[in-house]
């Protein structure tokens, strides 16, 4: 039985004080929840947020890490640098694929680096609207999974069961047009069968989340999908009440 997981992705929102206040307000929510609760604040606030909450109750994730181990990479933040403050890290969010040209190879390097340092990567996959319209959604997502998880280094293989997959169709992110639960179910099944075929028994522990315009109103419909183990929440995670309601729905699973 996989424990439900709800992740709040704050993207490039909040300031230092509002980030700390929002995180603090979520500690009692996480303490009461049957679901595991994780927030991903902007990188500059990670230290302040991590120091102001009990991380054994409310998990902290980073929104990204460098593909490089260390060295002359101005502006990058390595997986190792995140370890004192985080236990999770997002990889391959569609906004980073679009804004920063991140390829599956780059994302695979980030996943491998995160695993090597004991961070739990959340690999985001999902098709664009044009790819769905062309009937290519399943193929795109399988390609993203293979591209990012194809690295068979010792660390990747040994800790692959700590990976989470978030199915986030790009057209549903920040648009208020969530996927239907039927589409999310179909894609989650495709992801789970890919994981089973490629990773065997190790895939059993891997959680598959849905993300894209999740709200307090539609969370229950996604949590009713048997193939889904939780939710990756963007906009609604900035509202403590809405996020608490979503965590409550996931906990009732
Ligand atoms: P959204 O974002 O909930 O605002 O659509 C989800 C995400 O980008 O992870």
Image (cartoon, grey):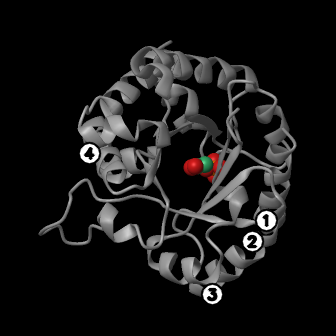
User: Residue, x 30% and y 43% (percent of image)?
Assistant: 155
User: Residue, x 40% and y 58% (percent of image)?
Assistant: 64
Residue mark closest to the camera, 3 vs 4: 4
Quadrant, the C terminus: top right
Category of crowding for the residue at label 1, using alpha-carbon neighbours closer than 10 angstroms: few (below 14), some (14–19), many (at least 20)? some
Q: Are marks 4 and 2 in contact (CB under 8 Å)?
A: no
Which numbered disc, 4 or 2, marks the residue that appears first in the sequence?
A: 2
State which quadrant residue 160 falls in.
top left
The span from disc 3 to disc 1 (Cα, nearest Å) is: 22 Å
Q: Is residue 124 above or below residue 63?
A: above
Which numbered disc, 3 or 4, marks the residue that appears first in the sequence?
A: 3
The span from disc 1 to disc 2 (Cα, nearest Å) is: 6 Å
Q: Are marks 1 and 2 in contact (CB under 8 Å)?
A: yes
Residue at disc 1, secondary structure: helix
Residue named by callout 1: 31
Quadrant, the N terminus: top right
Residue named by callout 4: 109
Category of crowding for the residue at label 3, using alpha-carbon neighbours closer than 10 angstroms: few (below 14), some (14–19), many (at least 20)? few
Out of 127 and 187, give the one closest to the viewer.
Answer: 187
Residue named by callout 2: 27
Out of 18 and 195, give the one closest to the viewer.
Answer: 195
Category of crowding for the residue at label 2, using alpha-carbon neighbours closer than 10 angstroms: few (below 14), some (14–19), many (at least 20)? some
Residue named by callout 3: 17
User: Residue, x 70% and y 36% (percent of image)?
Assistant: 178
Q: Is residue 182 above or below residue 84?
A: above
């Amino acid at each position: 039985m996989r424990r439900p997981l709800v992740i709040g992705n704050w993207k490039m929102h909040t300031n230092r004080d509002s980030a700390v206040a929002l995180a603090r307000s979520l500690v009692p929510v996480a303490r009461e929840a049957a679901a595991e609760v994780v927030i991903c604040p902007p990188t500059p606030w990670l230290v302040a947020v991590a120091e102001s909450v009990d991380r054994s109750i409310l998990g902290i994730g980073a929104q990204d890490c460098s593909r490089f181990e260390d060295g002359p990479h101005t502006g990058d933040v390595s997986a190792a640098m995140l370890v004192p403050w985080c236990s999770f890290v997002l990889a391959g969010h569609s906004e980073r694929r679009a804004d920063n040209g991140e390829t599956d190879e780059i994302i695979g390097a980030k996943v491998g680096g995160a695993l090597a340092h004991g961070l739990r990567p959340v690999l985001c996959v999902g098709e664009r609207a044009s790819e769905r319209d062309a009937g290519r959604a399943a193929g795109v997502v399988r390609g993203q999974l293979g591209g990012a998880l194809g690295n068979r280094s010792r660390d990747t293989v040994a800790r692959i069961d700590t990976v989470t997959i978030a199915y986030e169709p790009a057209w549903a992110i920040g648009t208020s047009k969530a996927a239907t639960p039927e589409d999310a179910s179909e894609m989650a099944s495709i992801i789970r069968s890919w994981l089973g075929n490629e990773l065997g028994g190790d895939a059993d522990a891997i959680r598959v989340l849905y993300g894209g315009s999740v709200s307090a109103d539609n969370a229950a419909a996604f949590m009713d999908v048997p193939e889904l183990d939780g939710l990756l929440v963007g906009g609604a995670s900035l509202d403590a009440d809405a996020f608490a309601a979503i965590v409550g729905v996931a906990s009732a699973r």
